[in-house]
Image (tube, helix red, strand yellow):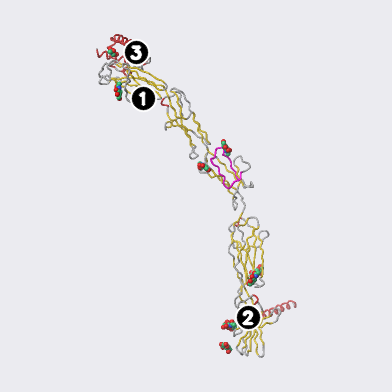
């Protein structure tokens, strides 16, 4: 109990002492460079003689700096080098010290002297200087993840008293953490000015989370009215981190790749900065080819299809992609210009080979048709055959082969005649078939002259027709020769000079179906023998006079008709 009371008493005494000192000891706070204002701290007493200001050196010896005689109403200043020109003692004994310095932090005493007494009142001077705005110097251009990076040094100059420097990341304070955050604070005091220079260096273990993180530092310092802080500019760093994944891309002009295309493989690492070099492994390549982030392949061929890989130079992180080179081949046999003879057999094949299933289509003279097959070639089989195939999955991949088939044949000639309505002129019609186009010439046996003919009229499929108009004075035999480089055919036709009115014989065969003709045949059957005799006589005569051509007798199927025509003529005459 007694001990408790004693403690309480001690506390109370301390309280009183503190109060008394607090009451007696004045403090004057001033900003560096500005004016220190020190009121005397004591009411001006009556019958005052003079007032004086002194300060106490470290060893306690007083140094008088200014005095004022109340009687004389006069102020005087001592010759103290440190304070020359800086002091001003006002009428109420307030001392002003201009241009506050750190060295002004002393204990000053105001003395008021009357005839009976001396009053002393001490004042402690405190000077404050704010530091320069903090600046982060020696910033790196980038930070690497996974190791301690120097973030920089935060520097705040010339502070009094010294302050503290704190670091921030995205506004949150950074405290030292082993191996992760290391902060080193260096203080230096200029012995001349007494000011503190502060420097704090930060080392920081960066991660990918520090991309765009804002670092700053703050200096906190004391001023007469409390603590103040000022902040540096924000510092943002490029964060370097290693590649964790490699991807490979194929850049081609179109969605699908075809032979002849130029393509580029692109290898991308997701690190920062992105890797610039890679190893490329085309199909079958084990070792890898060093290249930049792009790997061009020009004029790609089908054998370049396959898996392409790329990796970092250390062969880590392999990416792979499949490249398919589409191709389309077409084989047409035979192709180009093919010449065959009529009646020949020709087998034609068109086969497509491609990276996908394809079919072929056929065209003849730009019209579609089925796969042609020629067991017995005819003139109408001639033409331009095209075999085409398309790989529809691949833009613009189509192939076409052509076969220009020419069917040749030696000439085949057919003669017929008709009697013109005027009866005098007779028209001989020939039809010739053959390729190359045969040359046809007709002569009259009577004089051996070539006969004029009309222009040949094409009948299609290597057939042509023309007419010869004659007005025979006598019975004539017309001999026509058709010739091309494959051969020649000769036909002859007897034309009588006899006039038959209104008789037309465009085609000898049609006469078989003519009732009039049949009737006439019936009537004149009796005369047949006489005619035969005459004919035989004529034949003998001709045989004797002309044995020029052995082909003459081969006249094309008109023998019968001619005979009948001649018989008709007999009848008319009769
Ligand atoms: C002291 O002198 C100043 C002028 O120097 C005058 O203005 C002031 O009134 C005087 N004070 C007294 C108390 O006489
Ligand atoms: C002291 O201050 C007064 C006014 O506050 C001024 O008039 C006077 O010139 C000053 N004296 C000196 C020595 O600075
Ligand atoms: C003393 O005088 C100065 C100016 O001369 C004035 O600023 C100050 O307020 C006065 N102090 C007191 C305690 O009267
Ligand atoms: C110390 O301060 C003085 C005056 O302010 C200056 O001239 C000097 O260069 C400073 N010294 C250093 C080491 O900073
Ligand atoms: C500086 O930091 C110390 C310790 O953290 C603290 O005691 C002191 O008050 C701080 N000073 C300033 C000026 O912030
Ligand atoms: C591919 O590139 C070569 C030159 O590099 C060029 O001559 C050729 O025309 C290109 N081929 C295509 C299909 O663009
Ligand atoms: C593809 O074949 C051609 C010749 O057939 C050859 O020159 C080329 O090197 C081959 N390319 C690949 C990738 O095998
Ligand atoms: C054939 O026609 C030509 C002119 O076209 C003519 O000069 C010639 O006499 C004619 N020949 C015959 C046999 O009619
Ligand atoms: C044409 O007349 C000749 C005699 O001039 C004869 O020998 C021949 O057999 C006749 N030809 C035909 C097809 O009647
Ligand atoms: C012409 O032929 C006809 C019958 O074909 C015959 O009757 C006639 O006698 C012939 N004329 C001559 C001149 O030979």
Q: Earlier along the polypeptide chain: callout 3 or callout 2?
A: 2
Q: Can residue 162 be seen in this snapshot? A: no
Residue pointed to by mark 3: 546
Q: How crowded is mark 2: few (under 14 residues within 10 Å), some or many (20 or more)?
A: few
Asked whether mark 1 lies closer than 8 Å to ligand 8, one says no
In the figure, 200 relative to 353: above or below? below
Between marks 3 and 1 in the image, the one whose residue lies nearer the viewer: 3
Crowd band around label 1 with a 10 angstrom C-alpha radius: few (<14), some (14–19), many (20+):
many
Q: In which quarter of the image is residue 43?
A: bottom right
Mark 3–mark 1 Cα distance, whole angstroms, equals: 30 Å
First-in-chain label (1 vs 2):
2
Q: Find residue 186 and report its horizontal and vertical position in percent.
A: 67, 66
Considering the image in quadrants, where does the N terminus appear?
bottom right
Instruction: Name the spot of residue 532 as percent of width and height, x first.
Output: 31, 10
* Helix, strand or loop at mark 1: strand
**From the viewer's perspective, is 232 left or right of 497?**
right
- In percent of width and height, residue 189 lies at 66, 70
Q: Residue 58, relative to residue 342: is it above or below?
A: below
Tell me the CA gap for discs 3 and 2. 166 Å
Which contiguous range is marked in magenta? Answer: 289-310
Ligand 2, what quadrant? bottom right
Q: In which quarter of the image is the C terminus?
A: top left
Q: Residue 84 carries which label?
A: 2
Rounded to the nearest angstrom, the CA distance separating label 1 from label 2 is 141 Å
């Amino acid at each position: 109990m007694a001990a408790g009371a004693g403690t309480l008493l001690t506390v109370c005494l301390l309280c009183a002492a503190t109060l008394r000192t607090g009451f007696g000891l004045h403090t004057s706070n001033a900003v560096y460079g500005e004016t220190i204002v020190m009121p005397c701290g004591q009411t001006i007493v009556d019958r005052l003689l003079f007032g004086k200001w002194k300060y106490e050196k470290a060893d306690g010896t007083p140094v008088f700096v200014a005095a004022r005689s109340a009687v004389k109403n006069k102020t005087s200043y001592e010759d103290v080098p440190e304070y020359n020109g800086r002091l001003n003692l006002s009428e109420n004994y307030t001392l002003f010290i201009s241009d506050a310095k750190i060295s002004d932090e002393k204990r000053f005493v105001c003395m008021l002297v009357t005839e009976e007494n001396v009053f002393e009142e001490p004042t402690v001077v405190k000077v404050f200087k704010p530091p320069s705005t903090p600046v982060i110097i020696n910033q790196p251009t980038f930070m690497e993840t996974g190791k301690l990076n120097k973030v920089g040094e935060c520097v705040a100059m010339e502070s009094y008293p010294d302050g503290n420097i704190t670091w921030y990341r995205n506004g949150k304070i950074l405290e030292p953490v082993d191996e992760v955050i290391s902060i080193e604070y260096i203080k230096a005091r200029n012995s001349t000015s007494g000011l503190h220079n502060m420097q704090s260096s930060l080392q920081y273990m960066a991660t990918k989370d520090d991309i765009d993180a804002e670092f700053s530092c703050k200096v906190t310092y004391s001023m007469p009215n409390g603590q103040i802080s000022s902040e540096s500019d924000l510092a943002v760093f490029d964060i370097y981190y290693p590649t964790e994944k490699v991807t490979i891309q194929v850049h081609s002009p179109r969605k699908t790749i075809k032979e002849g295309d130029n393509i580029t493989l692109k290898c991308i690492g997701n690190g920062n900065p992105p890797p610039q070099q890679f190893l490329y492994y085309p199909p079958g390549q084990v070792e890898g080819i060093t290249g930049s982030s792009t790997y061009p392949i020009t004029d790609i061929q089908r054998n370049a299809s396959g898996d392409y890989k790329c990796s970092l130079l250390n062969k880590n992180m392999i990416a792979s992609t499949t490249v398919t080179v589409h191709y389309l081949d077409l084989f047409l046999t035979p192709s180009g210009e093919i010449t065959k003879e009529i009646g020949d057999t020709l087998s034609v094949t068109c086969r497509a080979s491609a990276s996908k299933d394809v079919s072929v289509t056929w065209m003849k003279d730009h019209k579609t048709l089925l796969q042609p097959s020629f067991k017995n070639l005819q003139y109408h089989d001639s033409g331009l055959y095209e075999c085409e195939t398309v790989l529809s999955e691949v833009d613009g991949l189509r192939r076409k082969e052509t076969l220009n088939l020419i069917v040749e044949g030696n000439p085949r000639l057919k003669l017929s005649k008709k009697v013109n309505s005027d009866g005098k002129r007779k028209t001989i019609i020939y039809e010739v078939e053959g390729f190359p186009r045969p040359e046809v010439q007709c002569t009259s046996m009577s004089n051996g002259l070539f006969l004029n003919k009309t222009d040949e009229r094409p009948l299609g499929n290597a057939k042509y027709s023309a007419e010869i108009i004659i007005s025979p004075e006598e019975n004539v035999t017309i001999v026509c020769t058709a010739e091309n480089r494959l051969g020649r055919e000769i036909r002859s036709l007897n034309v009588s000079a006899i006039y038959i009115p209104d008789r037309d014989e465009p085609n000898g065969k049609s006469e078989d179906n003519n009732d009039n003709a049949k009737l006439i045949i019936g009537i004149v059957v009796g005369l047949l023998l006489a005619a035969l005799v005459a004919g035989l006589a004529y034949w003998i005569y001709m045989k004797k006079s002309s044995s020029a051509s052995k082909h003459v007798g081969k006249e094309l199927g008109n023998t019968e008709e001619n005979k009948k025509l001649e018989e008709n003529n007999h009848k008319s005459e009769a």
